[in-house]
Amino acid sequence: MFHKELKAFPKNFLWGASTSAYQVEGAYNEDGKGLSVQDTKDVIEGTPDFKVASDHYHHYKEDIALFAEMGFKAYRFSISWSRVIPDGDGEVNLKGIEFYNNLIDELIAHDIEPIVTMYHFDLPYALQLKGGWSNRETIDAFVRYSKVLFENFGDRVRYWLTINEENMMILHGAAIGIGDSQNDNIQKDLYQQNHHMLLAQAKAMQICHTICMNAKIGPAPNITSIYPKTSKPEDVLAAQTFSAIRNWLYLDVAVYGKYNDIAWSYMVEKGIEPNMEDGDFRILREAKPDFIAFNYYCTGTVAESKIGETDLKTGGDQQISVGEYGVYKGTQNENLQKTEFGWEIDPIGFRITLREIYDRYHLPLIVTENGLGAYDKLEEDGTINDDYRIDYLKKHIEQARLAITDGVDLLGYCPWSAIDLISTHQGFKKRYGFIYVNRDEFDLKDLNRIRKKSFYWYKDVIASNGEKI
Ligand code: BG6
């Protein structure tokens, strides 16, 4: 659909960028922090551990000054659960509270709105040892943790995100480095974990509305439209099924408090549906998000998978779907180019996804991730000329504006990532930031911060409220 005239980005649009605690902070065992599952996992060969990351813990003032120089209106970051409660459900670590108090105050002093993710892939290791999300008691631990956050930071934080990419933790836990299930029926256990996280999220949303009267809260899954490989009805059906399993299962529960019918029948068919307790549906139904935050990198394309087929590859990650026998088969989209790391690039798919989510739920949306992972080069003259990143972001921002013109209520855009950090499974070399951090995979160098070309470009985008891209 073409528009003769485009709507402007809203006046208080939340331009910013995102990070997550374990990928940026470092200081993995400082000032009383407990270990998380990210600190204890076996990292993939050739990639670094998360002990130092971008050392944001010690550089946060300098980093926020740079965010302010870019003109950020918002900064989306996550709180490390095990920095605040080292063993997940015991003593509160005052030093951890102090760090996030300082961080939030520093943001506010620079007129930057904090958007806080409560949990981003880094479950406290002590909870993992007790069964992690397979253990229903982890719901209570999360509820208690959420109260600690609301009570300590709720006077200043107005935007809360519950759980980052719960759907990717269930579908691609291995790539993200989430503890493997010991259970014989891994998929059944995963959907049980999922149910517990959905309950934990619902309870946190309710508590937030009770404790922080002026705050808004929402889920933060990775959502992307799913295309059928061809117009063959079988492929269209497979795309619908995959979208239900990947996308709508998570958002239908968060928004409507009910399981998506197609996703539920998929689970029943496989005998992997979660066990429920009395009252679970009431808890899910009574929680209401104020907005939907979502991460978008590219669309997915699938074909039908016939029972008995044996050609599905294993692996996959957040953006590369492999498939499931008899359900769907991930395929490449020949119309799209790919990043150096093999993720497809689909700016129009961003508009399609924005429209699709808004059309289903009619809640305001915030984009909490979108971006290009690339091998950036620090030139001898000290510049980083990341024109490819500018090109990627520019095309996505153009599509966001078109989606706004289509009628989508979009509150903000926070691409990944504010500053270079460690990728979930592809090391430091896969950079996303506007700010270069001078370190390699294993050589920490001086960790200096250097403005990339995209830094100056994004500054102009924000200053012109998206008019000058
Ligand atoms: C999202 C995650 O899946 O994608 C981030 O929320 C992650 O934590 C980002 O870093 C990019 O993925 P990757 O695998 O390149 O780090």
Image: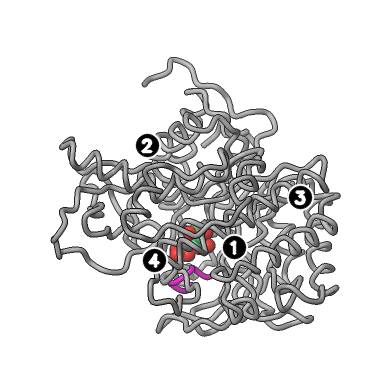
State whether label 2 is within 8 Å of ligand 1.
Answer: no
According to the picture, the residue beneath numbered tag 2 turns out to be: 348
CA gap, disc 4 and disc 3 = 30 Å
Up-down: is 108 above or below 146? Answer: above
Q: What residue type is labelled 4?
A: Gln
In screen coordinates, is 42 left or right of 153? left
CA gap, disc 4 and disc 1 = 21 Å
Observer-nearest of 333 and 152: 152
Task: Nearest to the eye among marks 2 and 1: give it.
Answer: 1
Residue 338 image-quadrant placement = bottom left
Up-down: is 452 above or below 212? Answer: below
According to the picture, the residue beneath numbered tag 3 turns out to be: 207
CA gap, disc 4 and disc 2 = 33 Å
State whether label 1 is within 8 Å of ligand 1.
Answer: yes
Q: Which amino acid does label 3 sit on?
A: Ile
According to the picture, the residue beneath numbered tag 4 turns out to be: 187
According to the picture, the residue beneath numbered tag 1 turns out to be: 120
